[in-house]
Amino acid sequence: MQSLDIEQTTRSRNPYSPGGNRPRRGDDSSTSARMYFVVCLALFTLIGVAKMAMPASDVDDEWAKKGDASGGWGSEHNHPIDPSGVQYSPPKQYSPPSQQTYYPLKIPSNSNKIDAELRNDDLVTALAPLIALPAQPRSEYKMYQDAEKFVPEDILYDTNTAHGKAFDFILNRDKRKLNGDDRHLIQRFVLTLIFYAMGGTDETDPKSYHTSTYGRGGWDSDTVHFLTGLHECHWVKKSLEDHFWGILSIESEIDQRVGVTKCNEDMEVTELRLADLNLVGFLPEEIKWLSTLESLDMQNNHLAGPIPKSLGDLDDLRYLSLDGNNFSGSIPDVFTGLMNLERVYLNFNEFNGAMPTSLCYLRESGILEDLWSDCGGYPITCTCCTVCCDMVAECDEIASQRPGGE
């Protein structure tokens, strides 16, 4: 019996016996655990793949956009969770930050309108104080001339007047688009006013002021290159009449041009020549705001009415030619302060009365060299003129005014 037990024990412990490779109970449990793990892993993998293939639910989508409960960064930039339980609805066109396309800021459509209104107000503020009514009664200014007190702003907005047309050009059609604080605004406005006051018509104006206010004559903007987008010192053109005779003339090129024929280094007008252009209308009082003007030539046109008293404010004026027009009334006594005035031509007009003492004073002082008027009898009385004309064609030098004369 003992030997049998030993044999059996030895047999069970022999690793080379037929039963030596049989697994023990502990080995069975380890294998089961590994099999369970593999099955679970496969199951989770299948679930994950299935979720990826299926569209996300509305609830999951909302939470993804809101972020987690602790305040995570969601596509809606960390909006708080609504405690009332109401679902948050993001904007329909919203996209996550990583997918957003940023566009430049669009200016509201009314911004340009606001800018235009501000510019309009600035221009009115700058130009209204300059406005003066014509001295001669004119139909287009009648309502303002008859009023006890006129409002300059009203005239600027009245495109039946030369002032209104000039303002309309500066405000709406001028390509330079000057603002109220531009140093050349007044100069540009006054030249534009002169253009319209003397019967000018702008061929580029869509409102078509193409019928002269004064019935006959006049000029258009192309005549002397007025109202272009260039600086007003370039509003000049070769004279058609002088273009032919200029071939044989020894005069300077400036004398063969019309318009703004000269400016100083600061681009301020010093010479304005509008001779022989068939101009009609009047010379506006605002001429005085061309304060650097040295030469004003308006001869041989059809300008009428009294000459403006504001000519006496042109301190730099040296040359004044208004001959060959239809100016009327008395010559204003406003020239005392013009100590640079050398030549004045007032003949072939309809003036009456006596030559003002201010001009005779300049003659007697030796400042004024030439003074022509219709003093060949009626209607001008002049004892200091160098030449007297007869209002038609004939002119005679006054013997007493000749150099060395008695």
Image (spheres, helix red, strand yellow):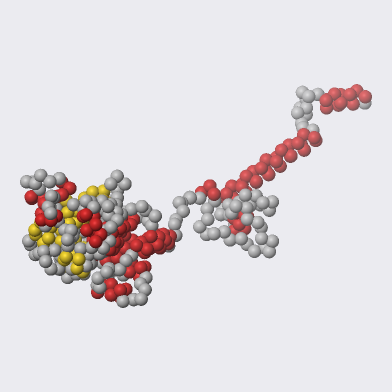
Image coordinates of residue 92 in percent, x first then y, are 52, 59
Image coordinates of residue 326 in percent, x first then y, are 16, 66
Question: Does residue 68 lie above or below 302 as drawn?
Answer: above
Q: Residue at x 17, y 54 (%)?
A: 370
How many callouts does the rendering have? 0
Q: Residue at x 57, y 59 (%)?
A: 90
Viewer-side residue, 394 vs 275: 394
Viewer-side residue, 224 vs 91: 224
Image coordinates of residue 19 in percent, x first then y, are 78, 29
Residue 229 in sight: no
Seen from this angle, which residue lies furthest right? Answer: 2
Residue 17 left/right relative to 128: right
Viewer-side residue, 221 vs 76: 221
Q: Residue at x 25, y 73 (%)?
A: 137
Residue 183 in sight: yes
Q: Quadrant of residue 108?
A: bottom left
Image coordinates of residue 59 in percent, x first then y, are 62, 58
Viewer-side residue, 211 vs 186: 186
Q: Residue at x 27, y 69 (%)?
A: 135
Quadrant (top left/top right/bottom left/bottom right) for the C terminus: bottom left
Question: Does residue 149 lie above or below 274 as drawn?
Answer: below
Quadrant (top left/top right/bottom left/bottom right) for the N terminus: top right
Q: Quadrant of residue 216?
A: bottom left
